[in-house]
Image (cartoon, helix red, strand yellow):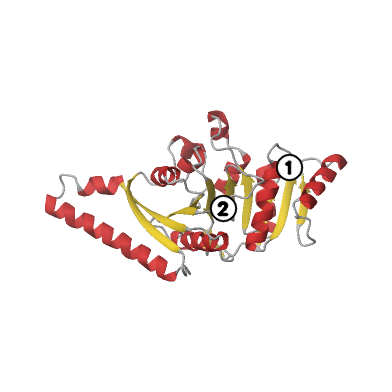
Amino acid sequence: MTSEVTKAPYPFQRIAVAVAFSPRVEAILAESKRLQDLFKAEMIFIHVGEKNLQQEQYLKHLLHRFGLDAPANQLLWEVGDPVEVIIDKCKELEVDLVVAGALEKESLLKYFLGSVARKLSRRAKCSVLMLREPDILSKPVKRIVVEGSDHPKTVNTVDVAVYVAKQTHADDVTIVQESDVSKMALIRSDVFSDEESEEHKEKIFEDENKRLDDILKCADCGTLKVNVERIDGKPGYVITQYAREQKADLLVLNSPDTKLNLIDRVFPHDIEYALADLPCDLLIVHSRVQELSE
């Protein structure tokens, strides 16, 4: 076993953007300019494909047009598998956040095979921002919904959500505490009396409330309004539906613990519910705390 210690998940000082010559390239670059200004970040634009003079001139023109041609920024042309190249470059350049455009809902075939954006979200070793509807015109981030699951990564995910909310001047952040239906079903079963079931239920809620209180004590919330919502249901599915119903501008989730594969898409991992049908822009936070790898 070897250990790897990496830097904190924020601030976003170095941001990579996956650039393709698609109809949405101008909107992606406009969003990139806003991210550059919000986070005072160094930007790295990565295009995977054979370089030709016409495309190079066009892309440089767009970078200049959107004010992204600062000396500190980089434009990289690479050849190979787009996902592998972007992941390798993000690791090599110690990127804090990688940005990619993503369709709200992929076709069934593309979902199972995986688009570039969704593959990055499952495999990147830095945080990933998936833009569902990038726009040339600026859109305010008013409402942020963040995962509040009982997981060691959650404290970092909440910290990042608060950091992003303060940088974007969001109105509020809502932490969604998903109560797993399997736990609720267990304490309501014939194993316990009604009184015991109620006691177990109250104990679960008390523990969850204390855990989130401890997280919020550590978060630098300042004057930011932070709400907590507890909802019974399937983890992953519940928060995705809540973000959609509340018309959230950004959903913030923990990164998956392992590389997700085809099986996870047949029998969904928590994050797959959001990836299958994006309710809004999605930020997947890679905690980048000390990790163990074989």
Q: Which of the two marks, 2 or 1, is nearer to us in this view?
A: 2
Q: Nearer the viewer, residue 203 or 278?
A: 278
Q: Is residue 95 left or right of residue 261?
A: right
Q: Which mark is residue 80?
A: 1
Q: Dot 2 surroundings within 10 Å: few (below 14), some, or many (20 or more)? A: few
* Residue type beneath disc 2: Pro
Q: Please, which residue is most extreme toward the right here?
A: 53
Question: Relative to 86, is 224 on the left or the right?
Answer: left
Numbered tag placed on residue 140 in the rendering: 2
Residue drawn at (56%, 66%), measured in percent from left and top?
A: 8
Tell me the amino acid under the disc marked 1. Answer: Gly
Residue 86: % across, % down: 68, 49
Q: Are marks 2 and 1 in contact (CB under 8 Å)?
A: no
**Residue at left offset 69%, top offset 49%:** 30
Asked if 264 appears above or below 177 in the picture, the reply is above
Q: Secondary structure at mark 1?
A: loop
C-alpha span from label 2 to label 1: 36 Å
For the point 78% across and 47% down, which residue is it? Answer: 62
The picture places residue 99, in percent across and down from the top left corner, at 63, 50
Relative placement, left or right, of 213 versus 274 is: left
Q: Are there few (<14), some (14-19), or many (20+) residues within 10 Å of tag 1?
A: few
